[in-house]
Amino acid sequence: PELCAVFHCRDCWTVLGDSLQLCSAGTARLDCLVCFKVTADVVWEESLLVGLEAPLLGCAYNALCCRSCGLAVGFILYSATSDLASLRGLFCFFKDRILCYLLENQMVVEASKVDFPAVTL
């Protein structure tokens, strides 16, 4: 992989996932990282929420939270508009809620400042 990173909760530094499970760097509408798998420290609420504002307007989703501190770190789309349909069932992390530990240079940076290589679903 060109860029290997471990994703951490912004508040408590719990490991949430890594770039080996990354399948998308988000869409034009969403500033998120999309993963196939996450660690056991990511929990999701069983009740569905409905987006009342952009960017999730009209979408049904489960909130993802950090098991350690409870910070809402992302979502799993259950139903979505056609432009977000490819993300249904995947783990979407908000870039502003996670930090990336870059393995190659051993640095911690905000996820919004990392450009991951393009991956197609």
Image (cartoon, helix red, strand yellow):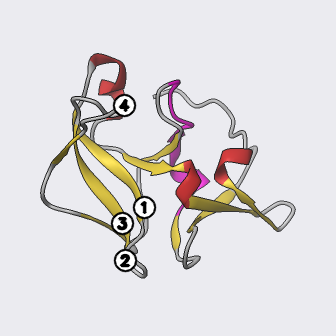
Q: Which mark is residue 57?
A: none
Please name which of the two marks, 3 or 1, marks the residue nearer to the observer. 3
Which stretch appears magenta? 17-28
Work out how far the residue at label 2 is from the one at label 1, CA to CA, in angstroms: 12 Å
- Residue located beneath label 2 in the image: 67
Which amino acid does the dot numbered 1 rest on? Val
Left or right of 43? Residue 32 is right
For label 1, the residue is 38
* Amino acid type, mark 3: Cys
Badge 1: few (under 14), some or many (20 or more) residues near its Cα, within 10 Å? some
Cα separation, mark 3 vs mark 1, equals 11 Å
Nearer-N-terminus badge (3/1) = 1
Residue 5 spot, x, y in % from top left: 68, 58
In space, the residues marked 2 and 3 are separated at their CA atoms by 6 Å
Q: Amino acid at mark 2?
A: Arg
Element type at marker 1?
loop
Residue 100 figure quarter: bottom right
**Is disc 3 in contact with disc 1, using a CB cutoff of under 8 Å?**
no
- Answer with mark 4 or mark 1, whichever residue precedes in sequence: 1
In the image, residue 13 above or below residue 57: below
Residue 45 image offset from top left, x and y in percent: 21, 63
* Image mark for residue 65: 3
Judged from the image, the secondary structure of the residue bearing numbered disc 4 is loop
Residue under label 4: 54
